[in-house]
Amino acid sequence: MLQHLLIVTWLFGATLTSYALNYSPDSINLNCFNCTYSNVTFFQLSYNNISSISITNNNMLQLNFNQNQNDSILINLGSMPNLQGLNVSNNKLLDFPYSLLSYPKWQTLDISSNGIIYLTKPIVTNSLHLHLQNNQIQELSDSLFQDSPNLEILDLSNNKLKQIKLETFSNLKNLSSLNLSKNQIQTIYGPLSLSKLNSLDLSENLIQALSKNMFSEVPLNLNELDLSHNKLTEISSDAFIQLLSLKDFSLQGNNITKSINSLRLPYHLINFDLSNCSLQEIDQCKFQNLKDIQNLNLEHNSLLCNCHLNSIINMYGSSVHIKTCRNSSEEIDKALINSLELNCKPQTCNNWNPNINSDASSNLNVSTEIEKGRVRIKWMTSLIVNQFHVSIKDSSENQLEDITLKYEHEYSFDTDSAFVTYHICVNALDRDDDVISKKCISVFMKDANIITGIVAGLLALIPCVFGLIYVTCKDRNYHRLNSNMQTITKPVQKSDLQQTNDKKVPAKLAAPQGNHNQGFQSDNDKLNSQYENVEKLPQTSVEIPENPNNNQLTYL
């Protein structure tokens, strides 16, 4: 048995784009060091018994290692900066090969058709496509894909999953395709919040019911929904109301006899599969809004040959797939339905538009967010519409924006004006561009930067105001003190004392009669005494030198 295979190839003047080593059951180890085939992009190692690979310093893009039938593989890819795809499917791997997740340019990682049961830790990868179908996986942790933000395609079909927490996929913002078919799923928890999801396959499970809010957060892009071959018996009438872009819808193989006539269906269905659903009667009014139908599969039911079925067949013609219908106890061929004497009268469908019977104005909510000169308008509705008209005017009724949006639930515009009122109207449009709901709001634009500047300016003036008050008070005190000093230093004139002496003393201060005032002097005597004392003060003269410069003298 060949235990070791060393590939050493010398190429002269040849261009090698792929290398294959197939059907070598004796090969166990493969070493290819510095096999620098610059043009080799595909390396095929399928259908061998290789359990150890060491391939380094290569420029290959794709490595296929499927069908080797090993329960463990030791893979050393060394320095292979351009490697984009790895296929290790159809082996017998029991553990997820976490060591292979680190390559920065992974686009496709195929680990399908192995024996993996448990995913013990989060899958950290930059891969765009991850294939885990046909394993034995029993459970998905909430954090399993929290570090796989680039995933676009995820296939978990044909495993042993029994319940799904949709929170598990909440970080996969770029996911466009999710396949959970052929599991044992009975219960689905939480809304599916994947705005870019285009295709969802939940077929061949054991799902019994769908909650009203399961699809409430994926209103825009879901085009394909497969719920066939489950155990559905009851479906909320509003379960699919947000799936505005849904085109391919399958409920095949469920027992939804009663639910179908209460469903509110999206407008733009193209392929609608209701085969083998135990249907006995369908309401033509539920289908009149489906003007894009190209395939309506009603086969393998027990539908009555009545006016409703006849109207649907006439409405869609060859797009309706049904072989027979039931009339009493016999089967009638589809082509013979018109020949039956059904006595059909014109049917008026008052509720053919699912938005009728709902308060349209109350089902459109509009809100705004203002930040750094940008106004963001958001709206939500439970109506089955996919077009919205947005009108924006200023306070002078000047038209600023007038736009119709498809599959959008928000719109933003920039503004360089402050303290301006905007009048915003959002109209929900039906398929014929008719307005079925309208909501208008007014928004007063307040520029936080301008307000902040005004407040900052006012705060900056406060010290100036206090300073002005302080200077004013100091000035007043200075003048008051100066006035007092002038009064104190003024010479006392005899005339001043004489004027005081001449003043008449009030009666109550006059000296009482008799001998009761002995030892006391009258006020006049006191003043005269003070004047005599002043006259007796020595006379002092102060010589002031001449000021040759005529400068103003300063007195201290």
Image (spheres, helix red, strand yellow):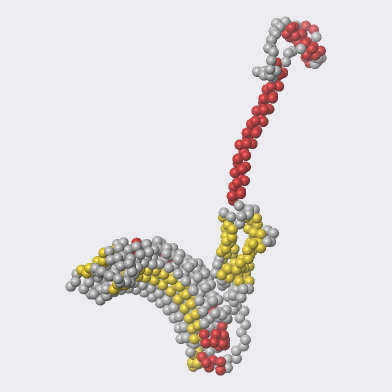
Left or right of residue 285: residue 114: left
For the C terminus, the image quarter is: top right
Dividing the picture into quadrants, the one containing residue 535 is: top right
Residue 500, relative to residue 181: is it above or below?
A: above
Left or right of residue 290: residue 122: left
The answer to whether residue 102 of the structure is visible from this angle is yes
Left or right of residue 271: residue 418: right
Query: What residue lies at 69% left-to-right and 19% top-to-bottom?
Result: 552
Q: Give coordinates of residue 184: x percent, y percent.
A: 38, 73
Q: Which residue lies most toward the left here?
A: 1
Q: Give coordinates of residue 470: x percent, y percent.
A: 64, 31
For the N terminus, the image quarter is: bottom left
Q: Give coordinates of residue 58: x percent, y percent.
A: 31, 65
Dividing the picture into quadrants, the one containing residue 457 is: top right
Nearer to us in this view, 79 or 211: 79
Query: What residue lies at 60% left-to-right and 46% top-to-bottom?
Result: 453
Nearer to us in this view, 280 or 355: 355
Left or right of residue 511: residue 130: left
Query: What residue lies at 45% left-to-right and 69% top-to-bottom?
Result: 176
* Number of marks present in the image shown: 0
Residue 29, relative to residue 450: is it above or below?
A: below
Nearer to us in this view, 438 or 516: 438
The answer to whether residue 537 of the structure is visible from this angle is no
Q: Which residue lies most toward the front here?
A: 13
Query: What residue lies at 52% left-to-right and 85% top-to-bottom?
Result: 319
Q: Give coordinates of residue 217: x percent, y percent.
A: 50, 67
